[in-house]
Amino acid sequence: MSCPLRLTVNGVPRCVEVETQTLLVHAIREQVGLTGTHVGCLTGDCGACTVMVDGETTKSCSVLALSAEGTEVETVESIADGDELHPVQEVFWDEFAFQCGFCLPGMLLTAKELVEQQPDADEGEILRAINGNLCRCTGYNTIVAAVRRVVREARAERGAG
Ligand code: FES
């Protein structure tokens, strides 16, 4: 059987019916049925549609679904372990780092990538990392505090002070 688009989403191989102009964000939400990835601006500015593609945060509204052929996509639904929140989710919860929650999936994936790829991120790197994720409630103080704490706790866990 021919398959328009094959990719892996959250570890599950998928064959997805898409048109040539379908955006990855719409394929994830409408064909795969994972609606944690949000549609905001559709212009690559807000970060609500952030997913991981082959381990890199990607604004899925800026990617044609067909160009994701063969990739490994991770969405926000993948980061908790059943009922157990990911440490980044725990910190956002503790710090009340969300209001309406619309930006939260993108913020979580961006913070998770930061701590994995730049575990010694300084203040400037933290701010740059979340620069592409907008909070329409403008709740940035708690979000930045949460990301700082994610980095601090990950550093402490590594015994790096
Ligand atoms: Fe993709 Fe805003 S919806 S960046």
Image: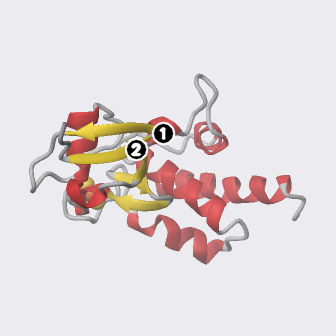
Residue drawn where x is 53% and y is 45% of the image: 97
Residue 132 found in image quarter: bottom left
Q: Which residue is mark 2?
A: 8
The verdict on label 1 being within 8 Å of ligand 1 is no
Q: Which of the two residues, 45 or 7, is positioned nearer the viewer here?
A: 7
Q: Is residue 90 left or right of residue 13?
A: right
Report, in whole angstroms, how far the alpha carbon at label 2 lies from the one at label 1: 6 Å
Q: Residues within 10 Å of mark 1 (few under 14, many from 20)?
A: few
Look at 71% across and 65% down and name the residue there.
119
Instruction: Please tell me the numbered disc located at residue 73.
Output: none
In the image, 26 versus 3, the foreground residue is: 3
Sort mark 2 into few (<14), some (14-19) or many (20+) by Cα contacts within 10 Å.
some
The reply, left or right, for residue 71 in relation to residue 46 is right
Give yes or no for contact between labels 2 and 1 (Cβ–Cβ under 8 Å): yes
Please name whichever residue, 53 or 116, is drawn nearer the observer in this view of the structure: 53
The residue singled out by tag 1 in the image is: 11
Give the answer, above or below, for where 127 lies relative to 31. Answer: below
Q: In the structure shown, which secondary structural element does the residue marked by tag 2 occupy?
A: strand
Residue 20 location (% of width, % of height)? 10, 55
Q: Secondary structure at mark 1?
A: loop
- Where is ligand 1, by quadrant? bottom left
Amino acid type at mark 2: Thr
Q: Quadrant of the N terminus?
A: top left
Q: How many marks?
A: 2
